[in-house]
Image (spheres, coloured by chain):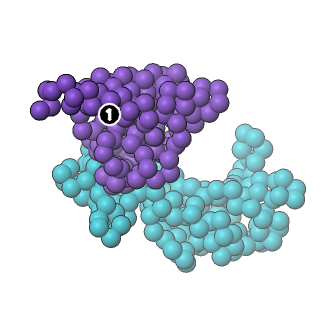
Amino acid sequence: MIQVESESVGKDGTKIVYVPKENLLEFMKEKKEEGFDMLLMVTGVDYRDHLEVVYHLLSTSTGNRIVVKTKTEGEVDSVTSLWKGADWHERETWDLVGIKFRGHPNLKRILLAEGWVGHPLRKDYPMDKKQYVNLAEDGEDTVSFDPSEGY
Amino acid sequence: MSDSILMTTLDEAMNWGTGKSLWPFTFGLACCAIEMMSAMGSDYDWARFGSDVFRDSPRHSDLMIVSGTVTKKMAPRIRRLYDQMAFPKFVISMGACASAGGPYVRGYSVVDGVDQVVPVDVYVYGCPPRPEALIQALKQLQDRIVAGKVKH
């Protein structure tokens, strides 16, 4: 049995489990073996003093759901080795919340332009510093703080 | 020369032809595109007004309907597609997002209006506008082209 921090039940009866980030991959492996064969979503939350990664799992045979949460400073293990679908979810979480996933095959931005400074869903993201995107000749995006260099 | 009867008449004929044969460019960016599809569908059927088939290539089209949120990543691509369109070309900015940023106006990733990217001929308000509003915008644009009031 893998060490968990706490367990609770959400309003809709879904089990919510807090797992220490060291045990996350092991815990997820166990859950997958228990029958949670589908990863519904991965997302990140910024609580100012710490970040949290949230995983929603579904068992397609029984219909059971479980929510797994991990407190982190900004780096957790990737679960792409267990569910292929985690790939883009983790890229999005990296893009917007800035959580690094160790062992991810292709961890780069998925929504914002490559070269964007900062992660917009962080609470300390400077909203007044606008960034401007343009397209280089080779088809790559360029990002600049200068309004004359992009849109 | 351009004031002579022949040229004026030819210009008018050209404008009339341009206005009545607008070929829109398939260019859906967000939920406004659903209303645009509805406008071209059988219920509203805007082929009645001579603006018939949506083309898939900027080379084949002369009307760009910017229907939806213009993100900063999309903006340079819109500009590139607009530059690839052949003259004469026209732009309809459809909905609150394309016209002024809409609900995302203070967002980090959205351009505050497509008029910062390409020149716009007609703005349509609404979130999203109904197909009737888009058809009205098309009629307005056609009337202005036929009257020779649109210069590009």
Residue at figure coordinates x 23%, y 34% from the top left:
B151
Among the 4 quarters of the image, the one containing residue B117: top left
Percent of width and height locating residue B106: 34, 38
* Residue A36 vs residue A60, the one in the foreground: A60
- In the figure, what tint was chain A given? cyan
Percent of width and height locating residue A113: 38, 60
Residue at figure coordinates x 51%, y 74% from the top left:
A106
Q: Chain of mark 1?
A: B
Percent of width and height locating residue B57: 46, 53
Please state if A54 lies on the left or on the right of A15 as rendered. left
**Element at badge 1?**
helix
Relative vertical location of residue A90 with respect to residue B144 in this rendering, above or below: below
Mark 1 residue type = Met
- Residue B87 in view of the camera: yes
Among the 4 quarters of the image, the one containing residue A79: bottom right
- In the figure, what tint was chain B given? purple
- Residue A25 in view of the camera: no
Relative vertical location of residue A97 with respect to residue B147 in this rendering, above or below: below
Residue at figure coordinates x 37%, y 35% from the top left:
B18
Q: Quadrant of the N terminus of chain A?
A: bottom right
Which residue lies under the disc numbered 1? Answer: B14
Callout count: 1
Query: Residue placed farthest to the left in the image?
Result: B1
Please state if B86 lies on the left or on the right of B42 as rendered. left
Please state if B111 lies on the left or on the right of A103 as rendered. left
Residue at figure coordinates x 21%, y 55% from the top left:
A149
Query: Residue placed farthest to the right in the image?
Result: A62
* Residue A66 vs residue A37, the one in the foreground: A37
* Residue B47 vs residue B124, the one in the foreground: B47
Callout 1 crowding tier (Cα within 10 Å): few <14, some 14–19, many ≥20: some
